[in-house]
Amino acid sequence: MNETRRALLDELAGGPVSGPTLAATLDVSRAAVWKQVEALRTEGFGIESTDDGYVVTSVPEFGASAVAYGLDADWAIEYHDSIGSTNDRGRELATAGETDVVVLADEQTGSRGRLRREWTAPSGGVWMSLVFAPDRPPAHAPIYTLAAAVATTRAAREAGVDASIKWPNDILVNTVSEGTSDESDGVIVVDEDAPRGGRKLAGVLTEMEGEADRISWMLVGIGVNANIDRDDLPAGATSIRAEAGDVERRLFVQRLIEEFDDLSGDPEGVLDAWRASADTLGRRVRVETATETIEGEAVDVEFPGALVVRTAEGERTVHAGDCEHLRPV
Ligand code: BT5
């Protein structure tokens, strides 16, 4: 999206604004303003010309301009109806020196999770990659995965979904599963298909390139099952649609970007936010690392994102791995 379009969307989001004022503010001709307004109408915006100036009357459901309109964070948006993987596209942009860009797609045809696992990404989801270049050492990279998980959880909660984080990067919806019951309102709900710990709503895949002391670029890929039927997702997954009904994706993505922008500006503050959004602390867990399996109680998280597990042999600090929530003994 070009700079004029972004600036125009910012001005329009502020209320009615006249053509001549826009031309002066954006430092372009009135004809150029008119052309951009027409382009937005073609994208699906309702824009009326009133005595007070241009007024936006409706915004398309999704797309680059739809997300940029009213976005309170300084990120450019690139949108694709369908793409292989937003992380692959993000990598292209990052290596070309672009930064503070969000690649967004309605559908992905070749997306992946960690360790090149398959990631299902049909139309209706929120598939996005944030490209940025924090002035930090590579060792701090995990904190941005945690920040993305917190931002996603907060946006999901605002959409009415009871989401929480499983260390390090899964966003789950707790289901009352076999063997436990919720009798608070006299009803016992059993979701027998749900994996222990809950159904997966979203995941985060972080990639980066760095020199010895500084990150060159980072890519935080976030996949959220938004307006998708459960049947179109792998077993054990859930969606915003299944939990709370459809969400306005442009508003959801705006919240997510704004939260991430805030959190990533204060990496040291992320841990407290993570503790408040996570479901892992205080639970019995089994963590599979590349070399071993660690079992015990998850007691804390340490900068830049390590899990502290109290085992029979003492406390262990785990930097990476797959974590499973176990039933309490
Ligand atoms: C993740 O990996 O959870 C990271 C997922 C990141 C996806 C985003 S979408 C935008 C960006 N572009 C990409 O290409 N990727 C990122 P992991 O923890 O390894 O979990 C992967 C596992 O989750 C798979 O093996 C499946 O079991 C399960 N899975 C696959 N698709 C899913 C879905 N849509 N919802 C829930 N679970 C899924």
Image: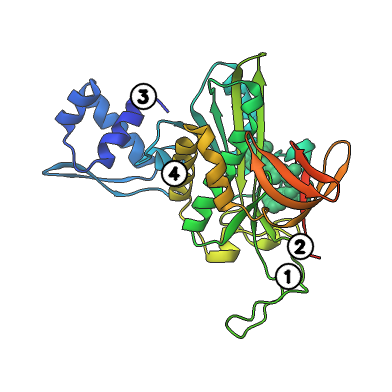
Q: Residue at x 31, y 31 (%)?
A: 36
Q: Which residue is mark 3?
A: 3
Q: Residue at x 65, y 18 (%)?
A: 210
Which residue matches tag 4? 254
Occupied quadrant, residue 293: top right
Graded by Cα atoms within 10 Å as few (under 14), some (14 to 19) or many (20 or more), the crowding at tag 3 reads few
Mark 1 or mark 3, earlier in chain:
3
What is the CA distance from the residue labelled 4 to the residue labelled 1?
33 Å
Q: Position of residue 290 (x, y in %)?
A: 85, 36
Residue linked to disc 2:
196
Residue 207 visible to an observer of this rendering? yes
Q: Is residue 62 visible?
A: no
Q: Residue at x 78, y 45 (%)?
A: 322
Residue 9: horizontal and vertical position, in percent? Answer: 32, 36
The residue singled out by tag 1 in the image is 177
Disc 1 versus disc 3: nearer the observer: 1
Across and down, in percent, residue 195 comes to 76, 62
Instruction: Name above or below for residue 235 compared with residue 210.
Output: below
Q: Are marks 4 and 1 in contact (CB under 8 Å)?
A: no
Disc nearest the viewer among 4 and 1: 1
The kind of secondary structure element at disc 1 is loop
* Observer-nearest of 170 and 302: 302
**As drawn, 129 above or below 247:** above
